[in-house]
Image (cartoon, rainbow, N blue to C red):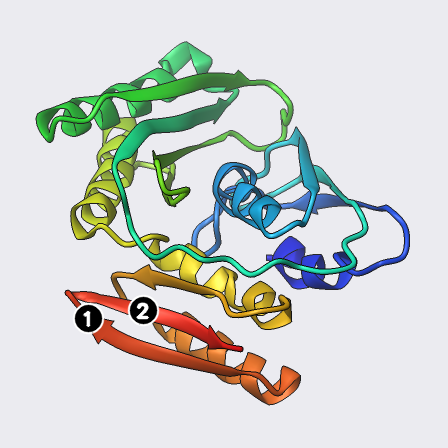
Amino acid sequence: MLLLTVLPICAFAENTVRLRVAKGGTDVSNSPAINYLRYVLLPMLKRMGLDVNLTVHKYGYYSKGMGEVTLTVEPCKTLSPLRLEKFGKMTAVKGVSVCTFLADRRVAERQANAANVLLRERGYTADIRIVNDVSNPLQKGSSLVLWAETDTGSILGTDAIGELRKPSETVGREAAEKLISEIMSKPTVDVHLADMLIPYAALAKGSSFYTTRILSEHLETNIWLAEKILNVKFEVERADGLYRIRRVD
């Protein structure tokens, strides 16, 4: 969450910004998993002209945290608008299943296998990378991030976090169920990316637009804040079961 706060500021620095954050939670409830940022948000921002690299040194989980990452942001004079009108055709389903000091219980494999079973039942084949991590001896934990890519440039992402007494198979099914819900609705961004993109759409030169399946409170709040702070205007339209978010140029 700290990275999401500072990234729009770093984007317009005169020189490269390297920000190292330590002792935090990279994969915890009520915030995006770190691999969601790496493989969903940042690739979308790169399309807008923002070049960001995120390196994970240590994964951190509830309750001790102790995660550590480095964010490297290259200077960006102007953000290009993001224009995602159509879902298109799916080209890939990918994922990263991580566990820290839980390899002996095959946690990362079990999460990925459970997700794959459910995805295959719906006709999707996923390439999920297994990461048996040993970066943080102070806090065991796990996470699973899944995303779908389409030929129009859309990325739909979901995640699920391991918890004490929460079976690995439940983590896998949770992430897969959320991704299936996104795919079936055919938006151009997922429900979480929809609100994360608002500051960048507001700062970009030109009109951005995309569709999402849910008009969340986070999305409505981000739109309200962007309009108040940056003196821009967004339009929200309901069409074909989706919400079309458009920054008015």
Horizontal and vertical percent for residue 225?
55, 82
Mark 2 Cα-neighbour bin, 10 Å: few <14, some 14–19, many ≥20: many
The numbered dot on residue 244 is: 2
The quadrant holding residue 37 is top right
In primary-sequence order, the first of circles 1 and 2 is 1
Q: Determine whether label 1 and label 2 are within 8 Å by CB.
A: yes
Q: From where the camera sits, is residue 57 visible?
A: yes
In the image, what residue occupies the spot 28% across and 77% down? Answer: 237
Horizontal and vertical percent for residue 175?
29, 39
Mark 1 Cα-neighbour bin, 10 Å: few <14, some 14–19, many ≥20: few
In the image, what residue occupies the spot 46% across and 25% down? Answer: 98
Which residue type does callout 1 highlight? Ala
The numbered dot on residue 239 is: 1
Query: In the image, is residue 97 above or below residue 171?
Result: above
In the image, what residue occupies the spot 90% across and 50% down? Answer: 15
The numbered dot on residue 90 is: none
Q: Nearer the viewer, residue 149 or 6?
A: 149
Left or right of 98? Residue 109 is left
Horizontal and vertical percent for residue 82?
50, 57
Left or right of 156? Residue 138 is right
In the image, what residue occupies the spot 37% across and 53% down? Answer: 189
Horizontal and vertical percent for residue 17?
84, 48
Which residue type does callout 2 highlight? Arg
The quadrant holding residue 243 is bottom left
Query: In the image, is residue 168 above or below residue 42?
Result: above
Q: Nearer the viewer, residue 107 or 49?
A: 49
Q: From where the camera sits, is residue 158 visible?
A: no
Task: Find numbered disc 1 in the image and state the secondary structure of the residue it sits on.
Answer: strand
Q: Nearer the viewer, residue 159 or 99?
A: 159
